[in-house]
Image (tube, rainbow, N blue to C red):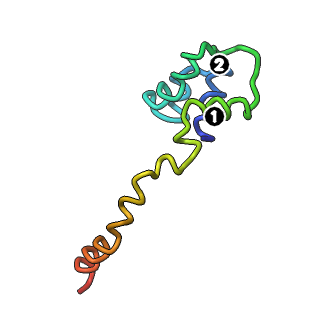
Amino acid sequence: MVDITEIDVHWYAGRSKSELAASLGDRKTIREYLAPAETSGLTPGEPPMSEDDWKKLIKSWFPELADRRLRQITWPDIDAHRDYFRACWGRRVSP
């Protein structure tokens, strides 16, 4: 979430999307993470917001990034096949 916060803070301070893309990521990623801020009516140059304020907003816009468990919902399904994977890899790796 720190990277997204950094993107939003720099944008809000007046850096262009092109400048952000050059230093923090590609244009598509920058647009993706700035879209909720723009949709919410935020515009660069408004009164400053704290980093905590940004983190709260970003958490509401991208909850899957704030809680890693939401990105790992398939792990229990994959874990059920752990022994099979180990057996397959073991045959390939052993001499």
Name the side, left or right, on which 36 lies relative to 49.
Answer: left
Which of the 4 quarters of the picture holds residue 20?
Answer: top right
Q: Which of the pair 85/79 is nearer the observer?
A: 79
Name above or below for residue 36 compared with residue 5: above
Mark number displayed over residue 20? none
Q: Estimate how packed mark 1 is, as few (under 14), some (14 to 19) or many (20 or more) residues with alpha carbons within 10 Å.
A: many
Where is residue 31? Give x, y as percent: 48, 24
Which of the 4 quarters of the picture holds residue 89?
Answer: bottom left
Q: Earlier in the sequence, mark 1 or mark 2?
A: 1
| SS assignment at label 2 | loop
User: Residue placed at 52% from the left, 29% from the top?
Assistant: 33
Q: Which residue is mark 2?
A: 14
User: Residue placed at 28% from the left, 79% from the top?
Assistant: 90
Where is residue 77? Give x, y as percent: 36, 59
Where is residue 71? Give x, y as percent: 47, 47
Q: Which residue is mark 1?
A: 5
User: Residue placed at 46% from the left, 32% from the top?
Assistant: 29
